[in-house]
Amino acid sequence: EKEGYEHFMIKEIHEQPKGVSETLLRRLDKEDHIVLDGIKLTKEDLDKINKIYIVACGTAYHAGLVGRYAIEKFAKIPVEVDVASEFRYRDPFVDENTLFIAISQSGETLDTLAALREAKRKGARILSIVNVVGSSVARESDDVFYTWAGPEIAVASTKAYTTQLVAMYLVALHMAMTKGTLSQEEYKKIMAELKSMPEKVQRVLNNCDTIQHLADHQFNNESVFYMGRGVDVNVAHEGSLKLKEISYINSFAIAAGELKHGTIALIEDGTLVVALATQDKLYDKMLSNIQEVRARGAYVVGVAKEGNKEIEKTADVVLYIPDTMDELTPILSVIPLQLLAYYIAVARGCDVDKPKNLAKSVTVE
Ligand code: M6R
């Protein structure tokens, strides 16, 4: 079933152009209007909604962080994102004017399901983004958006994440067009970019040899830091989770602006820092952060858009992604991070598809 790949994880990483394309194209009509069969939110419903909670666990939570960014940016509705295991116990402000969005690959994660039930009890409308058809989360929701990732076998989630991102962008754009917060022109521009994503993801994948080579030299670190600004920090969290769960390296992610408020104390000679610098607006600020860690001896792997070559002066290695709008970079920038985690874990001899202590679907609290 691995179709010639060594592990399910790498097979699933390579299935992302297909997953992204299916999740997107199945929702567009001939004029590129979004048609969400499973979602019945009307303009009246949306006008009533004054707050959105996105709730999920692990990788799905990280997709939710990008979802917040997209919904606030495009549809101008305030969004809070929470991990499911925390949401329930903090007495959240949920009422009938709240939209609750659950994200789950399996649709069986107990924490997410319990949070959903709590929100429902308090009167919220429930929309879920789920990969497994007919799963518990899907069955208990008012509206469902199915991602088209296909079955995900590896414990480390990869293609589920990128398809969840596409789902979040489509939901955000659908809300924006229903509410009238985006012009036709802006919509067309974003949609054209979204449609170019499968091919751009493929271009990043074609470069996997560079990343494998890098991993072969950088697999022995005791700890790895990921940093970024704006939407990049959300992707940094996902990259860090991927690395720790399959390679057992102690890793974490921070907003680069927070470096000097503590974390920089940990940077020493040879510390591996993965620095995402894909946001045009924040590019110069990221270059300064890279300089700060380099000055303390860090080995910096930068992630940047093709054409932004300035970073080569400060980072030790740069992994490029094709140029796109700042808002959509997560679909591309996560790919080198998935590949890096994968090849580092392989170089360390880890059981990539079945990391210790982890289950694919967490059906206990
Ligand atoms: O099935 P779900 O999307 O609800 O699962 C949520 C998390 O358990 C899952 O994303 C987990 O964090 C993955 N192992 C991450 O790679």
Image (cartoon, grey):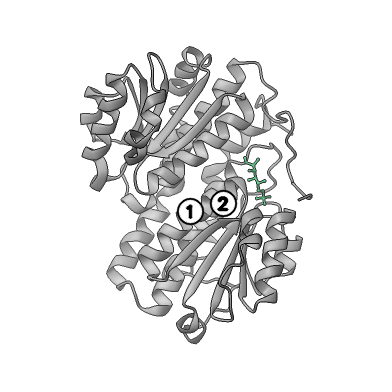
Label 2 CB sits under 8 Å from any ligand 1 atom: yes
* Residue 201 visible in the picture: no
The residue singled out by tag 1 in the image is 65
Relative placement, left or right, of 185 versus 196 is left
Q: Where is 26 relative to 162, above or below?
A: below
Q: Amino acid at mark 1?
A: Leu
Residue 68, quarter of the rendered image = bottom left
Q: Residues within 10 Å of mark 2 (few under 14, many from 20)?
A: many
The residue singled out by tag 2 in the image is 61
Q: Are marks 2 and 1 in contact (CB under 8 Å)?
A: yes
Residue at x-position 52% and y-position 16% = 219
* Residue 345 visible in the picture: yes
Residue at x-position 32% and y-position 47% = 324
Residue 127, quarter of the rendered image = bottom right
Relative placement, left or right, of 190 versus 50 is left
Q: Residues within 10 Å of mark 1 (few under 14, many from 20)?
A: many
